[in-house]
Image (cartoon, grey):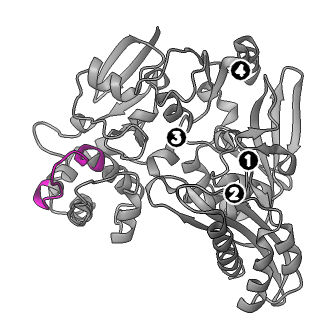
Amino acid sequence: MIPSKFDYVKPSSVADAVAALQQGGEDAKILAGGQSLIPVLRLRLATPSVLIDLGGIPELRGIREDGDRIVIGAMTAYHDIIRDDLVKQHVTLLAQATETVADNQVRHRGTLGGSLAHADPAGDLGAVALALDAELVIAGADGSRTVPASDFFVDYFTTAIGEGEILTEIRFPKYTGWGSHYEKFNRTAQAWSMVAIAAAIRVEGGSIAEARVGLTNMGTTPIRATGVEQALVGQPATADAVRAAADRVTEGTSAPSDADAAADYREHLAKVLTGRAVLAAAG
Amino acid sequence: MAQVRVTVDGVEYADDVEPRTLLVHYLRERLGKTGTLVGCDTSNCGACTVHLNGQSVKSCSVLAVQVDGAEITTIEGIARDGKLHPMQEAFNECHALQCGYCTPGMIMQAIDLLGDNPDPNEQEVREGIEGNLCRCTGYQNIVRAVQSAAAKMKPGSTADTQSPVSVAGGGE
């Protein structure tokens, strides 16, 4: 189908984009990589009055090291994240999860910031941002503010980004030397997660010293599996110990039931996949 | 209306387009490049795959206004001087098509894949074309064709691979 009519602006700075967004009012929509938005426009599930394309703002693209943080511009494409040496070394889990998103063509266009701002509960990168305690930098008319991932995801397709604001960068602490793995169960076409588990583990002397576990599509937002994390710490990285800890993965979740999977099946998947993810992460 | 200046298959165009015009519709309906097909309406199938500044994209998920200043290569732009691209030849030789609807997108994605990984194994080919669906399910010969083209396009190969390889450029 053909999208309904809209106006199009392509600002060349974040300040101009914020101004355009405020001028555009309620019906304005940000266009990042467009790999979720353009299909939605085509189906006319969204009919914005104006699209503000962030593709002309070079400062929103790129990956840099800033002290103990790896900073990723919101418009950095998946393809570039997967191949980046800083990400591979310090935020391995992000590279691993990003590789599973959609397909090559989508990964050439789709962006980390677009995915997080869209906040589809089946999207893969929210669980990673949450598990790894990322910080999200949001620009508005009065400057920038930083929101921890734990406060960023509010509800189904809803984030802490306010009206007239734009997500500009995502800051990850370094997890150098940690083991990590993204374990995903999905339909083949389009690779949307039915359930997926993001796990990062630091093993010291044969036992788990620290654990970070995030869940994809087990509720209306990404969820941090704090019960599993607590149960893992101090345990040996053995199959029995990890599986026992994984049993706590459904605490605080509200798995959806849909055409792909019923809630109780998702809960079962989450336990099994958590075991696999943690064991793979622990190497 | 917005103006878009774009190079498609080596030819420069300047056109006024509605912002809502999808790249694939611009290519097919304005430029007459009907070699690029629309297969689905959900970004699933990959039939509309073209190269945008050397990277494969689904042209149904890009707006024409977004490619202002860019370079696009479609299936119609990869043959040189009447000679097929090695990937096209390989699809022909390996009978890598049944109904042929997915073929333009498959070929464009396969060229992109070889740009990233010049010598993919079978699994890597399958992963590389995961965004392209063949509803005839003729994947066996498609995978064979991609591997056959990879062998031909290798530097030092005896096959004639003069200019098309550089035109392909996929990946970077």
Real-space CA distance between mark 2 and mark 3, rounded to the nearest whole angstrom: 20 Å
For this view, does A141 lie left or right of residue A16? right
Q: Where is residue A1 in the image (x, y as percent from the top left)?
A: 40, 28
Quarter where residue A266 is shown: bottom right
Residue A264 in view here = yes
Q: Mark 4 lies on which chain?
A: A
Residue A17, disc:
4
Q: Do the residues labelled 2 and 1 touch (CB within 8 Å)?
A: yes
- Subunit of mark 3? A
Identify residue for label 2: A86
Q: In this view, does B123 lie to the left or right of A85?
A: left
Q: Which chain carries label 1?
A: A
Using the rendered image, report if marks 4 and 1 lie on a common chain: yes
Extent of the magenta region: B92-106
Q: Mark 2 or mark 3: which comes first in sequence?
A: 2
Q: Mark 3 touching mark 1, by CB under 8 A?
A: no
Compared to residue A32, the image places residue B117 above or below, namely below
Image coords of residue A40 (percent x, y):
53, 33
| Circle 4 crowding by C-alpha within 10 Å: few under 14, some 14–19, many from 20 | many
| Mark positioned earlier in the residue sequence (2 or 1) | 1
Q: Point out the frontmost of discs 4 and 1.
A: 4
Q: Which amino acid does label 4 sit on?
A: Ala
Q: Which residue is labeled 3 in the image?
A: A109
